[in-house]
Image (spheres, rainbow, N blue to C red):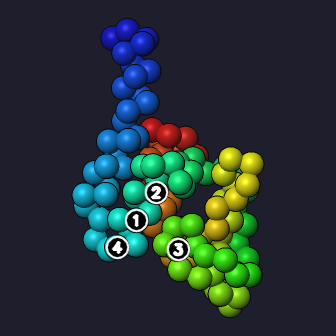
Amino acid sequence: MTLVRRSREERTKPRHHIEERVKLAKTFREEIIARRLLTGRLPRVSTAVIVGKPGDGGNCDGCDQPLSSPQLVMAVPFEKTFVHLHAGCFSIWNAIRPHTGEGKIS
Ligand SMILES: [Zn+2]
């Protein structure tokens, strides 16, 4: 296998993985998060800095529902800012996103 071919396959593999997850989504929330991973609205790679804190307004970047103050909210670094997710949406995102090992795209 050539290096070019191998790198092309490595670039497309995560996309196929997420497309499968969109098809297999059991809930609307899971489907919308998978679609946002596919379109780049949510990060595919998680860095080590994930901060759990009470919500302080705004909407979840996963499901667009409000982040109310008593809820645990996860802040995931993304393009020099953060996306904010409900703890439940964070779990869905983390399960759907393609990865092998620590934070690396498969
Ligand atoms: Zn949410």
Sequence-wise, the earlier of marks 3 and 1 is: 1
Label 1 neighbourhood size at 10 Å, few (<14), some (14-19), many (20+)? some
Sequence-wise, the earlier of marks 3 and 4 is: 4
In the displayed structure, does residue 27 sit left or right of residue 69?
left
Determine the CA span between mark 3 and mark 1.
Answer: 10 Å
Residue 64, above or below 97? below
Sequence-wise, the earlier of marks 4 and 2 is: 4
Tell whether circle 4 marks a residue whose Cβ is less than 8 angstroms from ligand 1.
Answer: no
List the residue tagged with mark 3. Answer: 64
Sequence-wise, the earlier of marks 3 and 2 is: 2
In contact (CB < 8 Å): disc 3 and disc 1:
yes
In contact (CB < 8 Å): disc 4 and disc 1:
yes
In contact (CB < 8 Å): disc 2 and disc 1:
yes
Instruction: Find numbered disc 4 in the image and state the secondary structure of the residue it sits on.
Output: helix
Instruction: Report the residue that reaches farthest toward the left.
Output: 23
Q: Image point 50% across, 60% down: which residue?
A: 94
Q: Image point 44% across, 63% down: which residue?
A: 33
Tell whether circle 3 marks a residue whose Cβ is less than 8 angstroms from ligand 1.
Answer: yes
| Quadrant into which the N terminus falls | top left
List the residue tagged with mark 4. Answer: 28
Q: Which mark is residue 32?
A: 1
Determine the CA span between mark 3 and mark 4.
Answer: 12 Å
